[in-house]
Image (cartoon, grey):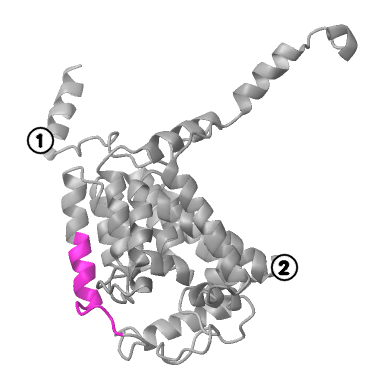
Amino acid sequence: MAELTGNPGWNVGDARARSKRLTLPWRRDLHRDAMLVIGLLVAIAQVTRILPTPGDAQAYWLAGTSSELYPDRWSQLDGGQFLFYPPPVAQISTLLQPIGWSAFLMGWTILIFACFWYCAGRWSLPLVAIGLLPVVGIHVPYVETFLGYALLGNMQWILAALVIVSIRHSAGWAGLVVTKTGPAIGGLWHVFRGEWRAAGVAAASTIAVVAVSFAFAPHLWTDWIAFAIRNYDLSDPPQPLFPIPFGLRLAIAAILLLWGARTNRAWTVPIAAGWAIPALYGMAFLPFWIAASRLTRGTAARSHLDSVIRRIGMTSFAPPQLELEPVPTIRSRRRTYFRSLGD
């Protein structure tokens, strides 16, 4: 065989061994695979209009061609013409316009359901099931929150997954700053733990994203800042808001993060992030709170994701609950310092 190939150092056995090393493992996982299939089916149904057009996904898409993103008051809704997020969301939408609405909706919906599984793990299918209860006439308060956000095309599940990723890869906090902004308070986890390198990476990434965005469209940032100032009190909302004011929720989130950081409870990060959403409609924080369960247990999702990313030479994106080191106290730092003097 070596003679046939003209390369005496090559044979079929070597090729098979090399291809086996490069093949990514795909272990069967009922919940993951089912959620991806559900996402694909929902996407097809939405594109073919068997299911209603997802309003939030449409708003993200139309923002890419809108000439007026920010109205005077945030209660003004006009079929997706307005977008209340910082400018990078609209700018990314503009870049995606060439692929067309159908391709965008397909990819976006599948991504949402993939993040749904990533956050909920083995609870993803039961959460989809209870989300269907209103369809059969069983009305349970707030059960539609989980599946409902996915069907709307809202980025809630994507941001919840990003919070988990950002605990290990702090550059991810930039994505939260330039979308719903408030959940980025989770980045204080690094500050409260004294993880200054991670905090610096988060800050530098955010500055870089904002700088690039501003360089291409400074007027959009001017408009968004003016919009935020006009609506800072969150009065006159387009829908009823959660009854606890944003300022109080933000303070509670910061205190929870401080306690969690000092006691190595990483699950407090998505809890705080969900609690700090400025425009909190109903129980919109629940996807983030479901994601917190990923930081309190080992899952098949974690082990599979770890193995895949190790094979492609990247650090694991899985939740780091087992790798957290205790935060040094002042006494332990002083003891370490005097020991170094003795050495």
Q: Nearer the viewer, mark 2 or mark 1?
A: 2
Q: Secondary structure at mark 2?
A: helix
Q: Residues within 10 Å of mark 1 (few under 14, many from 20)?
A: few
Reply above or below: 83 against 207. Answer: below
Identified at 46% across, 72% down, the residue is 152
Which of the two residues, 126 or 279, is positioned nearer the viewer here?
A: 126
Please identify the quarter of the rendering in which residue 61 is found. Answer: bottom right
Q: Magenta segment: does it hold 1?
A: no
In the picture, the quarter occupied by the C terminus is top left
Which residue carries the number 1 mark?
Answer: 331
Reply above or below: 221 against 4. Answer: below
Q: Magenta segment: does it hold 244?
A: yes
| Position of residue 48 measured from the top left corner of the image (x, y, whole percent) | 63, 71
Which of the two residues, 78 or 313, is positioned nearer the viewer here?
A: 78
Identified at 54% across, 31% down, the residue is 25
Reply above or below: 28 against 35. Answer: above
Q: In this view, which residue lies farthest toward the front?
A: 136
Q: Is residue 178 left or right of residue 47?
A: left
Q: Secondary structure at mark 1?
A: helix
Inspect the image, locate mark 1, and give the three-letter code of the amino acid beneath it.
Arg
Please identify the quarter of the rendering in which residue 107 is found. Answer: bottom right
Which residue carries the number 2 mark?
Answer: 98
Reply above or below: 199 against 2. Answer: below
Per the rendered image, the range of residues in magenta is 240-254
| Position of residue 100 measured from the top left corner of the image (x, y, whole percent) | 69, 69
